[in-house]
């Protein structure tokens, strides 16, 4: 591919919690290491297998509020009684350098990112069924019954937001879901409006 300069674009993946989008994001980056994974900030306590600075930047609610006051976040949302947000400095710098940034955020955050970065693309990931979603949330064995039922209720509400998104896919087979996300990114990288047309004409 001819390496013409262009701005990077945010790739937003949203899905009900437990639909498997975090592993989907990770696998896409494994296959395409040139894509940057946006590490969110959260006031949620880490799960036993999670690492600070790798899965999330884990902070106190007070520190999160300080970040809000200093406008350090591109977007944020309160999800299941915890704060979640995307650090601004990480994203802007990467996009300016032409790197595409993938982010795993909820539907509220997706709308804010689209407003700030109109070049962003958004993909809604659908779990194979509510039953599968429940199984995944239960197999995590880290959340209480109350948290699981909150997440299932939010899942139903989030499904209703699908009309705000550009693309959708069902995550019933991880490899096929990865292929679909990669195909969408490849097509979006060919979008003419992302380039200077004069540079393209000069290719031949
Ligand atoms: P979990 O606690 O299961 O890791 O994530 C709960 C929800 O928060 C998921 O729907 C996830 O996409 C969302 N989330 C994670 N990081 C962010 C973020 O930076 N901003 C927003 N708006 N949502 C996020």
Image (spheres, rainbow, N blue to C red):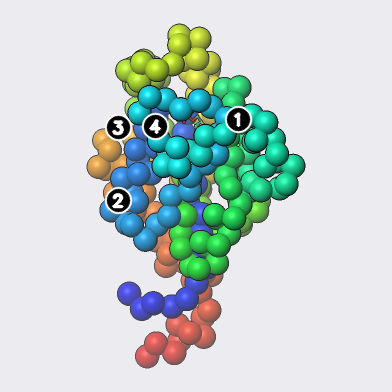
Q: Which residue is identified by label 3?
A: 172
Q: Secondary structure at mark 4?
A: loop
Looking at the image, is 133 positioned above or below residue 90? above
Count of residue discs:
4
Q: In front: 148, or 186? A: 148
Q: Which residue is identified by label 2?
A: 30
Q: Secondary structure at mark 2?
A: helix
Q: CA distance from mark 3 to mark 1?
A: 35 Å
> Quick one: label 2 or label 4, which is nearer the N terminus?
2
Q: CA distance from mark 2 to mark 3?
A: 20 Å
Residue 170 at what x, y percent from top left? 36, 35
Q: Nearer the viewer, mark 2 or mark 1?
A: 1
Q: Is residue 26 found left or right of 85 in the rendered image?
A: left
Q: Which residue is identified by label 4?
A: 50
* Figure quadrant of residue 42: top right
Q: Secondary structure at mark 1?
A: loop
Q: CA distance from mark 2 to mark 1?
A: 30 Å
> Quick one: label 1 or label 4, which is nearer the N terminus?
4
> Is the residue indicated by label 1 positioned so its CB lies within 8 Å of ligand 1?
no
Q: Nearer the viewer, mark 2 or mark 3?
A: 2
């Amino acid at each position: 591919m001819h390496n013409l300069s262009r701005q990077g674009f945010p790739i937003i993946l949203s899905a009900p919690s437990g639909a498997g989008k975090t592993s989907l994001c990770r696998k896409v980056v494994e296959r395409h290491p040139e894509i940057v994974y946006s590490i969110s900030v959260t006031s949620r306590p880490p799960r036993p297998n999670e690492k600070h600075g790798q899965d999330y930047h884990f902070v106190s609610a007070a520190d999160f509020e300080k970040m809000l006051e200093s406008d350090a976040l591109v977007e944020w949302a309160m999800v299941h009684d915890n704060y979640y947000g995307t650090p601004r400095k990480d994203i802007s710098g990467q996009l300016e350098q032409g790197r595409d940034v993938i982010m795993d955020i909820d539907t509220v955050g997706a709308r804010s990112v689209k407003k700030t970065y109109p070049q962003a693309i958004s993909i809604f990931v659908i779990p194979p069924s509510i039953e599968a979603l429940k199984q995944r949330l239960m197999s995590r064995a880290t959340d209480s019954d109350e948290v699981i039922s909150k997440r299932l209720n939010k899942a139903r509400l989030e499904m209703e937001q699908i009309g705000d998104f550009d693309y959708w896919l069902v995550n019933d087979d991880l490899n096929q879901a990865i292929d679909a996300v990669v195909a969408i990114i490849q097509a979006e990288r060919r979008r003419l409006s992302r380039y200077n047309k004069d540079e393209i004409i000069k290719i031949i």
